[in-house]
Image (spheres, rainbow, N blue to C red):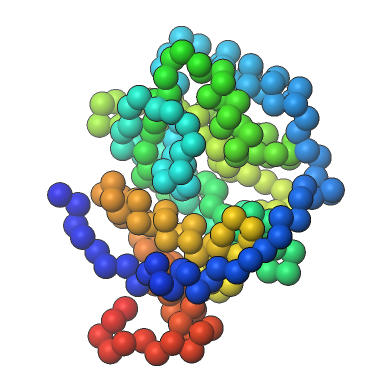
């Protein structure tokens, strides 16, 4: 049985980060993908998958909000990559006034996550849905890539999203205190960055995956939220 740990970042603290925000719409500075671009990329990935089972690697929100059908799931490790709050966002869970940060995979270390096997019957439709959920502009098409992962049943090739992204929205290797300060303050029209972190850590722990950086980060974010709202930390609490 996975070890039970008590998180410092609680649902009550996360709720304090919520505020109503308006969807600012597409960023006019971005080179958005057109319908024909999505179709071409979908066909490319479907063709590259061949006749093998199609697996998707999940390390963040795809674990707790997959939005696709799957017929099997396994623990998996992507070698040479690690989770990083390095993607700046001014929409979704951030705003133009207070940019947020979302996770991607950066080079180095290893990342324990989950892989999900998609049903065979509607592979193209499943890939299309994933692409429209994960990316929106040409700049980040290259961050969609095939990842070799290790599982207890042997190596598997899986489809990964936001793997090694580059560009002006990427803030690599930010120190955890700086990341925590952002996550405790950023909120967009779909919710807060604190909520995103809370859901990710909670579900990773459910699957027995303990990410030390994220665990430390949730402690720091909890401290930041208490500081912002003038909440005294109970004696003996985290």
User: Can I make out residue 229 in this image?
Assistant: yes
Q: Position of residue 140 (x, y in %)?
A: 68, 39
Classify residue 11 as left or right of residue 43.
Answer: left
Q: Quadrant of residue 12?
A: bottom left
User: Can I make out residue 216 in this image?
Assistant: no
Q: Quadrant of residue 34?
A: top right
The residue depicted at 65 percent of the width and 39 percent of the height is 135
Q: Position of residue 198 (x, y in %)?
A: 42, 61
For the C terminus, give its image quadrant. Answer: bottom left
Q: Is residue 54 above or below residue 59?
A: above
Near-viewer residue (26 or 117) = 26
The residue depicted at 60 percent of the width and 39 percent of the height is 134
Q: State how many labels appear.
A: 0
Residue extending farthest to the left is 1
The residue depicted at 46 percent of the width and 9 percent of the height is 51
Residue extending farthest to the right is 28
Q: Is residue 23 above or below residue 207?
A: below
Q: Position of residue 46 (x, y in %)?
A: 56, 17
Q: Quadrant of residue 32?
A: top right
Classify residue 44 as left or right of residue 176.
Answer: right
């Amino acid at each position: 049985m996975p070890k039970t740990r008590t998180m410092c970042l609680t649902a009550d603290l996360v709720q304090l980060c919520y505020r109503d925000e308006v969807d600012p719409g597409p960023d006019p500075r971005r080179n958005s993908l057109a319908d024909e671009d999505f179709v071409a990329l979908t066909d490319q990935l479907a063709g590259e998958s061949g006749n093998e089972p199609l697996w998707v690697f999940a390390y963040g929100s795809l674990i707790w909000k997959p939005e696709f059908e799957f017929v099997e799931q396994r623990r998996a490790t992507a070698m040479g990559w690690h989770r990083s709050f390095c993607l700046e966002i001014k929409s979704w869970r951030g705003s133009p006034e207070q940019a947020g940060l979302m996770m991607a995979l950066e080079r180095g270390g290893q990342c324990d996550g989950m892989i999900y096997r998609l049903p065979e019957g509607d592979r193209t439709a499943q890939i299309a849905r994933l692409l429209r959920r994960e990316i929106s502009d040409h700049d980040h098409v290259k961050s969609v890539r095939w990842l070799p992962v290790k599982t207890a049943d042997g190596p598997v090739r899986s489809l990964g999203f936001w793997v090694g992204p580059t560009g002006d929205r990427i803030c690599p290797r930010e120190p955890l205190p700086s990341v925590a300060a952002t996550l405790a303050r950023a909120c967009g029209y779909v919710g807060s960055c604190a909520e995103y972190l809370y859901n990710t850590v909670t579900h990773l722990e459910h699957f027995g995956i303990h990410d030390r950086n994220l665990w430390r980060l949730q402690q720091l974010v909890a401290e930041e939220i208490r500081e912002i709202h003038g909440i005294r930390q109970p004696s003996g609490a985290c």
